[in-house]
């Protein structure tokens, strides 16, 4: 069963922070399509208004342009809200190495502001985005919760701190928090532009525009690429999860392991393009290999990813062909 069959009380109000971003806008769209009331909070620093513009005509959708670093904004946004889906954050390992103070402000203090606002307002469930980067230099595969290594970037550290706050807010205050460790999410509306763009949309943009992509490293680094609809499902299932599962973090992936060079060659075949990639130096702070053990999320959240890589990438390629015309 996919997320579209999940049911909440008809009067439920959802707050999606970072709701104009890649993941957030897809969650907003899904909830509106399911018939629920959605409030979107975003300061548009990395999110795009165009991602949510089609939703603004719906009376059940409200956009608040604001910043999670401002506590008054957070308190206003959570009024009457039953479920908070906190996607607001700055991503990118390389950018975090360049801007550690900004990442601390947004990803730690901003998330803490939202947890505190949720606690004060009596929010039922607080679901927040964590990251597979918390596994750091651990070489164990597949990655399992409780078997983390030393973090390798400020970004990864911010997510590790968020998880600790999530645990404390459950233990000290009784707020049901659920941390979702995303593994390399891809799909429609993921930004293909800029030096910090994720690898799949970046490769697709370059290939479709006749450019030669560069692979950082030898191409043998592996990832658990996870289609966006699996992530939507994980967020909504966490909203329905038992309180006994709260205060914990969960791997959200597809449970697969793919090498970067194989992904590149798959995209070339799908687009009927034959271009040898360039190779550059490995990126500082990157985890070498990534593969999610999702058994804990299956057991405690009921997470059952509907999309494997092949199914998801076919949909993503179709979307980018249209978007990048």
Image: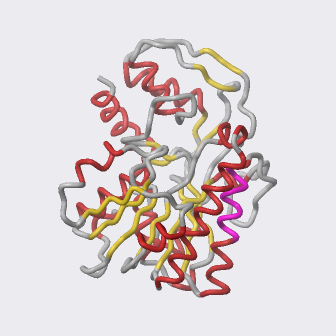
Image position, residue 109 (x, y; %): 64, 63
Q: Main secondary structure of the magenta part?
A: helix
Q: Is residue 26 above or below residue 109?
A: above
Residue nearer the viewer, 88 or 64: 64
Q: Quadrant of residue 81?
A: bottom left
> Residue drawn 47% across and 29% down?
193
On screen, residue 316 versus residue 164, left or right, reads: left
- Is residue 139 visible in the rendered image? The answer is no
Q: Residue at x 37, y 52 (%)?
A: 25
Q: Looking at the image, which residue sits at the far right?
A: 150
Q: Quadrant of residue 149?
A: bottom right
In terms of depth relative to the viewer, which is nearer, 57 or 186? 57
Give, as a single range, the part of the protein colored magenta: 155-164
- Residue 292: percent from the left, percent from the top? 61, 54
Instruction: Return the residue nearer the eye: 171 or 273.
Output: 171
Instruction: From the top left corner, tell me how far across and down residue 236 is, in percent.
Output: 40, 68
Numbered label tally: 0
Kindly identify the residue that appears in the image at 57 percent across and 16 percent down.
Answer: 277
Side of 51 where 260 appears, left or right = right
Residue 161 magenta-highlighted: yes
Residue 286 visible in this rendered orientation of the protein: yes
Residue 310, image x, y percentages: 42, 40
Please identify the quadrant where the N terminus is shown: bottom left
Quarter of the image where the C terminus is located: top left
Query: Which residue lies at the image location 29% right of the left edge and 63% below the top edge?
Result: 62
Residue 172 drawn in magenta: no
Q: How is the image coloured?
A: secondary structure
């Amino acid at each position: 069963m996919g997320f579209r069959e999940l049911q909440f009380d008809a009067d439920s109000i959802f707050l999606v922070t970072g709701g104009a971003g890649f993941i957030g806008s897809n969650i907003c769209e899904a909830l509106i399509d399911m018939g629920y009331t959605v409030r979107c909070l975003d300061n548009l620093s990395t999110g795009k208004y165009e991602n949510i513009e089609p939703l603004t005509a719906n009376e059940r959708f409200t956009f608040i342009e604001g910043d999670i670093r401002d506590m008054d904004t957070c308190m206003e946004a959570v009024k009457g809200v039953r479920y908070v889906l906190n996607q607001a954050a700055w991503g990118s390992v390389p950018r975090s190495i360049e801007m550690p103070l900004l990442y601390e402000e947004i990803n730690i203090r901003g998330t803490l502001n939202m947890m505190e606002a949720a606690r004060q307002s009596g929010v039922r469930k607080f679901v927040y985005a964590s990251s597979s980067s918390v596994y750091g230099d651990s070489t164990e595969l597949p990655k399992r919760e409780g078997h983390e290594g030393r973090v390798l970037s400020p970004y990864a550290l911010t997510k590790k701190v968020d998880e600790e706050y999530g645990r404390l807010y459950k233990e000290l205050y009784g707020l049901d928090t659920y941390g979702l460790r995303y593994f390399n999410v891809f799909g429609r509306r993921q930004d293909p532009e800029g030096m910090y763009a994720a690898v799949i949309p970046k490769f697709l943009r370059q290939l479709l525009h006749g450019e030669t992509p560069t692979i950082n490293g030898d191409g043998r680094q592996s990832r658990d690429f996870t289609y966006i609809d699996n992530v939507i499902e994980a967020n909504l299932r966490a909203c329905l999860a038992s309180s006994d599962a709260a205060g914990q973090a969960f791997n959200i992936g597809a449970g697969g392991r793919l090498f970067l060079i194989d992904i590149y060659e798959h995209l070339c075949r799908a687009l009927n393009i034959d271009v040898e990639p360039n190779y550059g130096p490995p990126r500082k702070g990157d985890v070498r290999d990534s593969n999610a053990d999702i058994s804990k999320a299956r057991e405690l959240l009921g997470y059952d990813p509907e999309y494997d890589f092949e199914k998801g990438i076919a949909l993503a390629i179709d979307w980018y062909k249209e978007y990048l015309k």
